[in-house]
Amino acid sequence: MKHLLFYSTALALSVSMAGCGNKQKAADVPTNDNVILHAWSWSFDTIAANMKNIDNAGFDYVQTSPANTCFIGEEGGMALFSQPGDSVKGKWYYYYQPIDWKIGNYLLGNRDQFKAMCDSANKYGVKVIVDVLPNHTAVDHTAVTAALDSAAGGHDKLFHANGFTDITDYNDRYQCTTGKMGGLPDVNTENPAFQHYYMLYVNDLIANGARGFRYDTAKHIGLPSDPVDSAAERNNFWDVATGREAVEGVKLALPADSLFIYGEVLQDKNVKEREYTEYVDVTASAYGHALRNALRAGNYYADSLASWHHTADPDRLVTWVESHDTYANEHESADIEDARIREGYVFLAARQYGTPLFFSRPAGSTRQNYWGNNRVGARGNDEFMNPEVIAVNKFRHAMHGEPEKVVVSPNGAAIEVARGDKGVALINISDATENISLATTLPDGKYTDGVHNTEFEVKDGTIMGEMQPLTSYILYKK
């Protein structure tokens, strides 16, 4: 036990000394002012090479795809998604099939490359969020390493007793938190031996520079109030993962409130959304769905956007127009034009609450070819550097603490997000020119948007001007 306690203490000391860069743009304690770039399927080297661009675009966090050792599928091919007959094979989702919890995989890079990426992030004051997935192993569970089996106390101890039973009712919390999802055997996340091994991985990520985590399939990991699998004694994974408890002498190396930790808690009928927020921030998946409906229609009123569609407080939400799942799995959002996605992001990022995430679509992708250049490791398209994205990211930082007021034109095409009387974002989500006359909190005067050099006038509490189709404008109080 002593050597484990020493490891935990020494690691905590080392990470407290790491992350002391020249610039601390993202606050030491995360706030709702921050924005996330999801560098989906970019390699560690690619992220590192683009860190200056990420910083210049105003992103506080860059989220990586999973860094863990994973199943090698289709002979190690590097296609995002290969089709029969393609010369290059591969699928992006193999990094979501762990065979061990160590840093490095064939798709994104090794441990040294991960550290170099984090060092680059630290240089620019950007913080790294790592996608982690303790809930399951690869579909071929026999591929897990001998080291992982041994650490868990044997192969059978690695899984829930119910871990090979397919989930048939996702609203049954016992099935949802202990059963096999999509062919992925369910790990016994309550096994202290597994928890210990997993936390060594988390702490190694922190020691190498990670400053946040996205918990994949978080709603499939039991809460204290959930039914307990017969192979477990109690549901304490979230207490361990967030540093409330140590396990076999190892504890989260940094205070949880100094990290940005959120869970993929996709909303459904019987999901304990608010209880999850006692531990981590959660995803506003229902709001994203509603926003996509409005964007497709070019009409704010096409769905309900006044409510966050969530039981959790809005400052505990991670918001998005789309996620990698909505884009890559069922292609639920992949048909929406880049410009509409961008205007939806401007709307989210201009608002007071939530932490907005911008998903990086594949380079070369079109609405006819969702995979674009179709290579894991490559940088996504240029949308994350679009001047409108940059402008709204900077606007969000500048509007710290300012209350929001959302005003919408009668036809639902033009949206104004006012932040106190300090600034407004104007977003046209339609494909037609809009001449606006909207109530505003800005003082009277003439205002010029910095991106498009478009002038608007405020007179007697009304803002007037012409908005081009699928275009946004950022205005600041003089």
Image (cartoon, grey):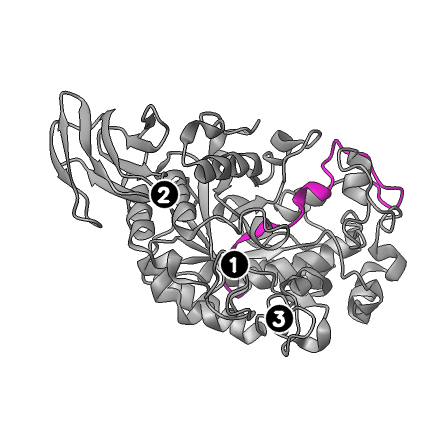
Mark 1 residue element: loop
Disc 2 vs disc 1: Cβ atoms closer than 8 Å?
no
Q: Which residue is mark 2?
A: 346
The secondary structure making up most of the magenta span is loop
Q: Nearer the viewer, residue 268 or 84?
A: 84
The Cα atoms of the two marked residues, 2 and 3, are separated by 34 Å
Mark 3 or mark 1, which has the lower sequence index?
3
Mark 1 lies on residue: 368
Inspect the image, locate mark 3, and give the three-letter code of the amino acid beneath it.
Gly
Q: Amino acid at mark 2?
A: Val
Q: Dot 1, crowdedness within 10 Å: few (<14), some or many (≥20)?
A: few
Residue 128, image x, y percentages = 48, 58
Please say if 181 is above or below 121.
above
Which residue matches tag 3? 104
Q: Is residue 146 magenta?
A: no
Question: Relative to residue 473, is residue 216 depicted above or below?
Answer: below
Residue positioned 82% across, 40% down in the render: 168
How far apart marks 2 and 1 lie (CA) works out to 24 Å
Q: Quadrant of the C terminus?
A: top left
- Range of residues picked out in magenta: 208-233
Mark whose residue sits in front, 2 or 1 = 1
Q: Camera-side residue: 53 or 169?
A: 169
Q: Residue furthest top?
A: 460
Q: Answer whether residue 248 is visible to the viewer in this image.
A: no
The residue positioned farthest toward the left in the image shown: 445
Q: Secondary structure at mark 2?
A: helix
Going 86% across and 60% down the picture, which residue do you hit? Answer: 153
